[in-house]
Image (cartoon, helix red, strand yellow):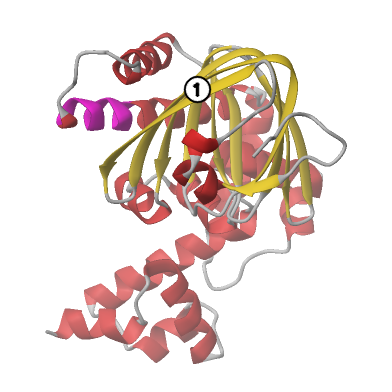
Amino acid sequence: MSHAASPHPVEVEASDLLERHEQLDFGRGAWSRLSIVGLQEGVALLGWQAGFDSPCELRLRDDSDAVHFGYALRGRSRCRIEHGRRREEHDFPAARGHLHYGPDSRGRFLQHGEYCSVSVMLRPALLRAWAGEDRALQCALDDGHCLAHGLHGRELHAVAQSLHQALLPGAPPRHALWLQGQALAFVGLCLEAGRDGAAAGLGADERRRLLQARDRLLSDLAAPPLLADLAATHGLSVLRLQRGFRSLFGCSAYALFQRERMHEARRRLLAGEARVTDVALELGYTNLSHFAAAFRREFGLAPAIVAGRRRA
């Protein structure tokens, strides 16, 4: 199966790439070695080494339903990612990391020269559980698409390097707990780098305006303001407001509002403050089925079950 650069490169699925990586043929003058270690259910560690004498393009459809955390130790990769109507082109250089989540997204990756990287693939449900109160990450997962790149830091590079060394052929075997601990540290450092980088891209004044806009947005969880009014009140355009929310909080203004509203609904139900119908009405829902559907999307449970647990 050849994936050398051509006018019409073959598209492969991520699952097929992982299952049959030993059979991959990238064409003349190319070599590739992929190491995969399953750390636990829903968590996999990957190490990739490759060399390409001439440009090689791989088209990949992501059917993995996983969040990908990657770090390039040598070489660089250029890619174009398509997810629905979104079209993004990026350059992933050496000594930089990235995270990507985009179920059923399609990517075109151009490689040339030597390349070496490590990656951790993580099921979204696990990441949600481990992320805890990281609202920005939770919102990004809710959006069904997130991409951060240019992640860097001395500690992140060191952990990526240690994982790479452990995956080399002939390397002394490491304990499974060491591998899992290093992989989770790698994920945490990627998230920290992404959060710090997003915030650093905003000026102090714009950051202040966005924080004020967030406070206004969440001041009444029963009635969200119009985005145009919210932006105008804080001296921002709607475009700058939306971009700023994604950079600072990791999601759109509406996604942040909806998440906070559902968490407030859950708090009230667990506290036994009101019946499900009353909580729905208090939070601006006139249709109980719409409220129940939104609650189920957020927590995977019907609100009546949560209310019943409190009474039990």
Q: Quadrant of residue 183?
A: top left
- Visible residue check, residue 261: yes
Assign the magenta stretch its main secondary structure.
Answer: helix
Q: Give the left or right position of residue 74, taking residue 267 as reference.
A: right
Three-letter residue code for mark 1: Tyr
In the rendered image, the vertical position of residue 134 relative to residue 179, given as above or below: below
Depth order, front residue of 240/305: 305
| Percent coordinates x, y for residue 163 in the rendering | 33, 19
Classify the position of the C terminus by image quarter.
Answer: bottom left
Mark 1 surroundings: few (<14), some (14-19) or many (≥20) residues within 10 A = many
Q: Give the left or right position of residue 275, taking residue 156 as reference.
A: left
Residue at the disc numbered 1: 71
| Percent coordinates x, y for residue 230 in the rendering | 71, 54
Q: Residue at x 42, y 52 (%)?
A: 124
The magenta segment:
177-185
Residue 184 lies in the magenta stretch: yes
Q: Give the left or right position of residue 111, taking residue 288 as reference.
A: right
Q: Give the left or right position of residue 293, taking residue 102 as reference.
A: left
Q: Residue at x 62, y 37 (%)?
A: 247
- Visible residue check, residue 236: no
Q: Residue at x 35, y 81 (%)?
A: 303
Residue 142 lies in the magenta stretch: no
Q: Quadrant of residue 143?
A: bottom right
Q: Secondary structure at mark 1?
A: strand
Depth order, front residue of 71/185: 71
Q: Residue furthest left?
A: 312
Classify the position of the N terminus by image quarter.
Answer: top right
